[in-house]
Amino acid sequence: MLQISNIKKNTQEVIDKLSVKNFEATDIINKLLSIDNDRKIIQKTLDDKLSESKTISKEIGKLFKEGKIEEANNKKQRTSEIKKDVKALNKKLNDITEELNSLLILLPNIPHSSVPRGKTSEDNEIIYQEGNINKLVTESLPHWELASKYDIIDFDLGSKITGAGFPVYKGKGARLQRALINFFLDEAIKAGYKEIQPPLVVNEASGYGTGQIPDKEGQMYYINLDNLYLIPTAEVPITNIYRDVILKSDDLPIKNVAYSSCFRREAGSYGKDVRGLNRLHQFDKVEIVQIQHPGKSYETLEIMREHVANLLRKLELPFRTLKLCGGDLSFTSALTYDMEVYSGAQEKWLEVSSISNFETFQSNRMKLRFRDKNGKIQLAHTLNGSALALPRIVAALLENNQTNEGIIIPKTLRSYTGFDIIS
């Protein structure tokens, strides 16, 4: 959530920057400023009433000591009237603050100055590419056919048990999943991240804190009897560990990593681009999260991007990095890099990671703050990234490494899988 103080101080700049996200903010911001002005008037009146009450209370005590009972009682009558006014003003202040917040949550995060303009993913900027796209064996197969051929992933069985988008991993397929999870966790721990095992369901306050509510609640699975949500990513519970917390500057950066299953309804996703592992309702992912000092968050974002790049190098997968344009940037993000791997048999790039800096957008919602060395309390910056999401990594590994003898496991994974080939 944006800070009203920043909107008031830099009104036109905020409007102009939000236009990069193709968001027309003028009407909302003008209404916000008008409401905030009314709020200030109410707050000033309330403060004056409280000050008057405090002054009269002191006078009453003095009058009683001087034996001026009637005059003291008259003053008490006035304090009773002020109490009624204070109660009414507090209600007005609460109501207008709620109205203000209801408008603030409609505004997306301000994009970083480096975010390119654009409307769709077609306008994203490719900033880096690495690795050779090797020619596959004759009559190479897409991963869903390889999964069936080697009996390692069963999409039909998943549909029988639950529905489409919930595959069953079997034998070496299940072991490959577990190997990737352990490899990603180990690499993050080596990089200084502390492992967390979070709940897979969160309450509404947690969803609001990281910005899924009210923006993306339609994409989350909802448990209505308990008013809980299945997590779309471990980012949600991990970041919310620090909700309503004031950290010390020496605590920063906080680096957490978590493996979790992730659940997404993916409403409206149909067609050939969602076949097999390309888009699932349940999938596994290792997530890295950092809480950082505002002056260091963009340096941290680059370090996180390089961490993900190194994972892809070790898996021997060709990859590229995209800087998302304003139109493809999420509601909560200030700057996002997408990492894509090349899928040999499908002959297309598949997104496997997003690494984002949210600046103070999430921390303002969560009241996640730190006390700097001068004793001043300020909002921290939050960042996260997929390191990595498994489905499309598995898809690319199966397709790119298929040979006439079977699917070759990358060297870095063999100590985790316990086998060199799926055949």
Image: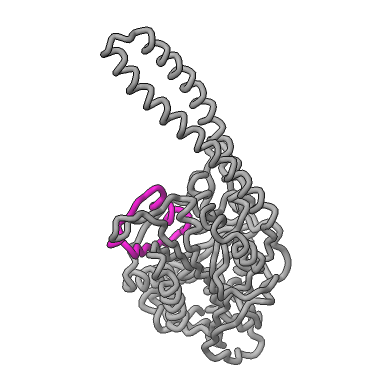
How many marks on residues?
Answer: 0
Question: Is residue 174 inside the magenta stretch?
Answer: no
> 269 or 295: nearer the eye?
295
For the N terminus, the image quarter is bottom right
What sort of colour scheme is used for the picture?
one colour
Left or right: residue 411 compared with residue 212? left
Residue 83 vs 91, above or below: the answer is above
Q: Position of residue 238 (x, y in %)?
A: 42, 56
Q: Residue furthest right?
A: 271
Would you say residue 160 is visible in this rendering? no
Q: Position of residue 356 (x, y in %)?
A: 50, 68
Q: Nearer the viewer, residue 18 or 363?
A: 18
Q: Could you say which is closer to the camera, residue 217 or residue 156?
A: 217
Q: Is residue 57 left or right of residue 363?
A: left
- Quarter of the rendering containing residue 13: bottom right
Name the image quarter holding residue 279. bottom right
Regarding residue 148, the answer to whether it shows in the image is yes
Q: Relative to residue 22, is residue 350 drawn left or right?
A: left
Which image quadrant for residue 313?
bottom left
Q: Position of residue 180 (x, y in %)?
A: 44, 71
In the image, what residue occupies the spot 64% across and 62% down?
15
Whether residue 241 appears in magenta in the rendering, the answer is yes
Q: Residue at x 52, y 81 (%)?
A: 407
Bounds of the magenta segment: 235-261
In the rendered structure, the answer to whether residue 328 lies left or right of residue 62 reads: right
What percent of the width, then of the height, locates residue 71?
A: 38, 11
Decide which of 86, 382 is in the foreground and name it.
Answer: 86
The residue at 68%/57% (across/down) is 26
Q: Name which residue lies at 68% across and 61% down.
A: 23
